[in-house]
């Protein structure tokens, strides 16, 4: 008997009939002889509707109250799901994040999980019940106030609970068949990846692949918990995210490149004419850190000997641009840089693959493919298993398609035709 | 400085603009130098919408899950109300029933409050915050599951918290100006009652007056907590419910009759031909009690000497009729009664007044008034401060109007014209 943790997102429980369908899948898993714990998000548009209401009463609602409001969303979906399961003749018990022992810090809106003490969930399992747990929410260790985990919160709840319960697998249900070698909306020949490592998945997530959030993969890696990303609309195998995907005698060789990710949500700021003195760059990035801005890529030009000045470019979430620019303007007199340039018409394209470690020439092939498709590279950043470039936003699609083709990721013609139905 | 507990019902917080208006009233009370604790119901139709959803997934949802679902309603309204208050520059903190220390038994859907431990609320008050508490909900002492209190639950939460916090007054806000001498929709000359005793108010509530629920008045009487029932649409004084309304030098003499209440929600069952032996009536009512049916009035005819059999009639909530009839059918062979009669076309009309104790002839005047208006009496029940009669449902309006007139409760012409604006 295995312990299976399943997570269903908002689109999987969008209305009563969706909830009933999910209930049947859960009961089928239970009937197959497994213990089942389910993490559920708020129904479809509930969160947006609640945010709308909040906006109507206050332009700047306090974080504590916003969390109190939003957590009603999962309360509704989890109770309905428990009812639907009961209606199929199985015992189900719903639990809030607090009841499930999801203990967080008190950063409302983006709390971090500090501890998971799932005593009540374990008790429900021991009694043979199916436990339904609200995703995305917890309770603050210090203030005992209700918190929400922010983006990717339900996935993180699922993985954290699965780890605390020592589950055999955490299944993340979504509306696609798994993780693909590229966004199928851009590359129609993109294929489903059957198995991928935590490290590659984290690079994919950090580089814009939206299926799994970075936090949840980090958490799974720490506890070596297998994640199975799959569709709630079919029973096909999806993508397994595991520590070493290639050791278990899979029939294929390890591919060089696992996939191509892209991200259009970043902007670029260039600080022009920074005096090339020790500590100037540090002051700039300390200022940005104090404003709680996450910087992604950073490039510093070689200092021009004539002027003794240099340019520093970096990328950041477009949503944080205004805050960043304002913070930097404030320290302009102190640092003495010349000006600020801002560009939000950029995109990031990333190649991810553990295989590139042992294959020289990956960078050359990647850049040649981009050049052939007429895309200019503005910034470059690399890790052991990733190469990212910043290009102009209009060139993203062409860059993704070119890279996908250059590394032989395109599916065979036949497979491509049935894409979405078969995968690989 | 006083501690004021205010309760706002669903119609007072039906939408964002209602919530903002309530927030202003709360802030005004705070600014007047009071500590304020607010109990709030779910917004307008939220509860019905949630019940609708539940029905879509399950015809018979488990009580535990239904409570989990419904309690999301107050969670939404209380968070929004706290935001609206914060937007007016005052600190507000919302608390679930569980967080507010409302401890109940584990009867889902109609839990009873066992204890109130409002440590977090007191702490919020001490910090100068306005505390917003979800009405209608608590947490089970034994199972730690979320419970709802059933009908009148939010009023009961308000009174229970007010008592536990040793508040000076519990203000119940509603959409009418207070408690009236009769339903103004039936008797246009009905007047607002300025002060009424707990005992009279309990009889009024038990007899169909819908403004305050019996449980909440019982609770207030036990702790001698003044209730002020008033309109959320005006700042006029409403009705004070207190232990002795006539000692504080009010200008008027104690009236004989405080008001006329009516109730159309009951039905009558007659058990025909019950063998007149010791214990037969007991078996009947034990059966009904086991089925958790609340019996109201009971009448047993004098046994007919010739047959040794008698008829027993009783009234009960119409909603429980089917259950009651089924239970009784089951014990028919054992008891040996002849048949069951059922009538849901009845109404109850009640005269309530502490003054009737010292005024003989009240019953005669009442019955004469009913006779004059052509209404036939089917059953009678009395207490020290109440006389109730069962009449046919079509006669209820005429009976209420006749009684109201017979006991000089009608307002003067002038007052009647401005009814709804002035009251008394």
Image (cartoon, coloured by chain):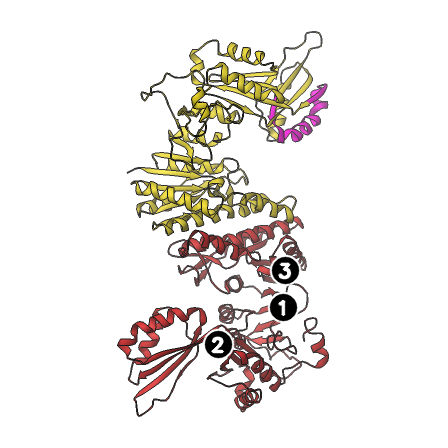
Chain colours: A yellow, B red
Which disc, if any, is residue B176?
Answer: 1
Earlier residue among tags 1 and 3: 3
Q: Residues within 10 Å of mark 2 (few under 14, many from 20)?
A: some
**Eyeballing the image, is A40 above or below A381?**
below
Disc 2: host chain: B
Q: Where is residue A264 in the image (x, y as percent from the top left)?
A: 59, 26
Q: Position of residue B289 (x, y in %)?
A: 36, 71
At 60% from the left edge and 65% from the top edge, which residue is drawn?
B174
**Depth-wise, is mark 3 or mark 2 nearer the camera?**
2
Asked whether the beta carbons under mark 3 and mark 2 sit within 8 Å of each other, the answer is: no
Front in this rendered view, residue B44 or B230? B44
Q: Does the magenta stretch include residue A32?
A: no
Q: Where is residue B168 in the image (x, y as percent from the top left)?
A: 58, 65
Q: Is mark 3 on a helix, strand or loop?
A: loop
**Depth-wise, is mark 1 or mark 3 nearer the camera?**
1
Which quadrant would the C terminus of chain A be assigned to in this image? top left
Q: Is residue A319 magenta?
A: yes
Front in this rendered view, residue B14 or A250? A250
Residue B376 appears in the picture as rendered? yes
Residue A100 appears in the picture as rendered? no
Q: Is mark 2 on a helix, strand or loop?
A: loop
Q: Please state the extent of the stretch shown in magenta in the rendering.
A: A314-341
Specify the farthest residue to the top.
A306
Asked whether the beta carbons under mark 1 and mark 3 sit within 8 Å of each other, the answer is: no
Q: How far apart are marks 3 and 2 (CA)?
A: 49 Å
Q: How far apart are marks 1 and 3 (CA)?
A: 24 Å
Q: Where is residue A169 in the image (x, y as percent from the top left)?
A: 36, 34
Q: Name the residue under label 2.
A: B345
């Amino acid at each position: 008997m295995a312990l299976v943790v399943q997570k269903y997102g908002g689109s999987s429980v969008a209305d009563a009939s969706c909830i009933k369908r999910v209930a049947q899948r859960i009961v089928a898993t239970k009937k197959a002889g497994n213990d089942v714990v389910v993490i559920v998000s708020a129904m479809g548009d509930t969160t947006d509707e609640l945010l709308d209401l909040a906006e109507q009463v206050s332009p700047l609602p306090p974080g504590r109250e916003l969390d109190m409001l939003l957590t009603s969303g999962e309360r509704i979906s989890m109770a309905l799901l428990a009812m639907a399961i009961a209606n199929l003749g199985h015992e189900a018990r719903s639990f809030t994040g607090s009841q499930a022992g999801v203990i967080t810090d008190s950063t409302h809106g983006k709390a971090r999980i500090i501890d998971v003490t799932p005593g009540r969930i374990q008790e429900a399992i021991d009694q043979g019940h199916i436990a339904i747990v609200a995703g995305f929410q917890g309770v603050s260790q210090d203030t005992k106030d209700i918190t929400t985990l922010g983006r990717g919160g339900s996935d993180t709840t699922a993985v954290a609970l699965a780890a605390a319960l020592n589950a055999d697998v955490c299944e993340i249900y979504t509306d696609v068949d798994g993780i693909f070698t590229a966004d199928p909306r851009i590359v129609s020949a993109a294929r489903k990846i059957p198995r991928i490592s935590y490290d590659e998945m984290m690079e994919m997530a950090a580089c814009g692949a939206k299926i799994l959030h970075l936090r949840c993969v980090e958490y799974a890696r720490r506890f070596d918990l297998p994640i199975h990303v799959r569709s709630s609309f079919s029973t096909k195998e999806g993508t397994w995210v595991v520590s070493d995907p290639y050791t278990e005698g899979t029939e294929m060789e390890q591919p060089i490149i696992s996939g191509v990710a892209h991200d259009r949500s970043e902007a670029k700021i260039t600080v022009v004419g920074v005096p090339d003195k020790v500590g100037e760059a540090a002051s700039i990035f300390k200022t940005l850190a104090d404003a709680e801005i996450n910087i992604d890529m950073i490039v510093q030009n070689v200092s021009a000997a004539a002027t003794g000045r240099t340019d520093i470019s970096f990328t950041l979430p477009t949503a944080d641009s205004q805050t960043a620019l304002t913070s930097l303007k404030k320290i302009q007199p102190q640092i003495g840089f010349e000006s600020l340039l801002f560009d939000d018409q950029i995109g990031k394209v990333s190649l991810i693959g553990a295989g590139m470690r042992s294959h020289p020439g990956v960078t050359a092939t990647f850049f040649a493919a981009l050049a052939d498709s007429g895309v200019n590279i503005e910034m470059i950043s690399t890790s052991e298993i990733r190469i990212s470039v910043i290009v102009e936003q209009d060139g993203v699609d062409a860059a993704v398609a070119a890279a996908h083709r250059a590394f032989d990721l395109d599916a065979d013609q036949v497979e491509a035709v049935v894409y979405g139905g078969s995968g690989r």
